[in-house]
Amino acid sequence: MLFKESVQIALKALLANKLRSVLTMLGIIIGVGAVIAMVSVGMGVRRNVQSSIASLGSNMLIVSPGSANSGGVRSAAGSTITLKYDDAEAIKNKIKNIDYVSPTVSNSYQIVNGNQNWNSTVQGVTPEYMAIRSLTVSTGSFITQNDLNTRNRVAVIGTTVAENLFGTTNPVGKTIRVHNSPYKIVGVLESKGQSSMGQDQDDVVIVPLTTAQERLLGITYVKSINIQVSDSTKMDQVQSEVETLLRQRHHIIGDKEDDFSVRNLTSLMQTMTQTTTMITILLGSIAGMITTMTMTTAMTMTTTMITILLGSIAGISLLVGGIGIMNIMMVSVTERTREIGIRKALGATFQNIMMQFLIESVVIGVVGGLIGIGFGCTASMAIARFGGFNTVITAAPVLLSFFFSVGIGLFFGIYPARKAALLDPIEALRYE
């Protein structure tokens, strides 16, 4: 029997019992669709977190003050006054494999333009901050070394500040008031959007570090030091050298606790990637558990860990979905016993009957998988549009879900097909 004829017979058999065929495929459809949708949400979360951390700058170390400990009561991290501008200069001059170093300070102020006002974060930085944070100026320019040396009252503003104070007018060259002092706007930053934590990265006013220290805050210390390492493979080495240098400069000896902390954003990126990967896994798992009659697919296999975990979870749901296919195929064999006897009497071989019923079970998996993929992609787009989530549909889960649905149909169709092929033609012809 030709393969094409076998497929046509399989489709006719499914169409002859439409409701039963739909109910059989429903588990596959819901399972494939739900997991694709949930994994797309998880991948969207993962991409948002990665983009947010990447927006802070590549190969970046952040040095922050430590926490004070008085009378056994520890204050908040970053509450001590331990970092100086000279610390940043020492790091820049004495440690290799560093591209840029920028000490920073920040505080919240009301920004005023005429009768318009807006509360925003004012950051005091050095010119290197632009390269470290991968900032781009859409209009005008960034602060310069001359602004830093002369403590100029100049400012670079984010798009959120620009829109709220100036609307559609180009603010470059205009004057705003910060803490009752005039500042000339020299540039507007390109928009960076929200961070993964929902913080508006465009709601910022950047001024020279020395201006912020002396004219705004009246301080001599800095609140953080941003460091861009030239080579990502040198991150741990540079971090260790920075910690050693600062301990020497701050006269910290022996087991005495550091009065600063150094955060490695590359390690943070890896940790957050692992965390969001687990979120993706859990979302896929939840979809599989909800659809208990489904054949949930192990499809977000971006790492070996995902493959192992989803494989174990998918094993249960695959078994349940496969039993549904096996059940309907057993019913089909029973109903068509006389038909099988006639075919065997006319010369159909064991392989012919086996192939016929295997194709029917695979067709269930193929059709159910295709419909499930359409359902999953549609659900993912609907979640992105109406649910406020960013979703990412990738080829891997779609293809794997399809091949798993085909594989399920094939695997769980073997026993019914074998049972049909082993029927005695004489007994089958007698069956009523």
Image (cartoon, helix red, strand yellow):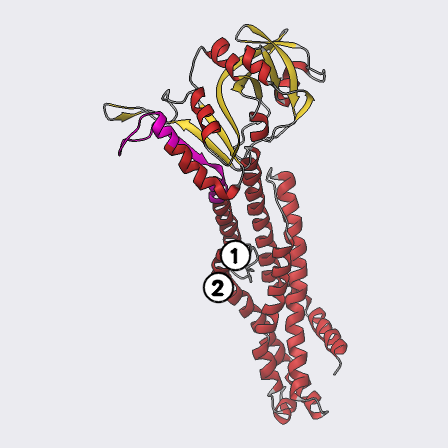
Helix, strand or loop status at disc 1: helix
In the rendered image, which quarter contains the N terminus? bottom right
Q: Which residue is mark 1?
A: 288
- Say if the magenta span includes residue 4: no
* Left or right of residue 36, residue 66 in this image: left
* Residue 259's disc number: none
The magenta segment is 245-272
Residue 151: image x %, image y %? Answer: 54, 11
Of residues 264 and 390, the one nearer the viewer is 264
Residue extending farthest left: 71
Which tag, 1 or 2, sits closer to the chain's start? 1
Q: Is residue 233 visible?
A: yes
Amino acid type indicated by mark 1? Gly
Residue that appears at 57% across and 47% down: 43
Q: Quadrant of residue 415?
A: bottom right
Residue extending farthest bottom: 426
Residue that appears at 68% across and 79% down: 356
Residue 39: image x %, image y %? Answer: 57, 50
In the rendered image, which quarter contains the C terminus? bottom right
Q: Quadrant of residue 9?
A: bottom right
Q: Are marks 1 and 2 in contact (CB under 8 Å)?
A: yes
* Residue 316's disc number: 2
In space, the residues marked 1 and 2 are separated at their CA atoms by 9 Å
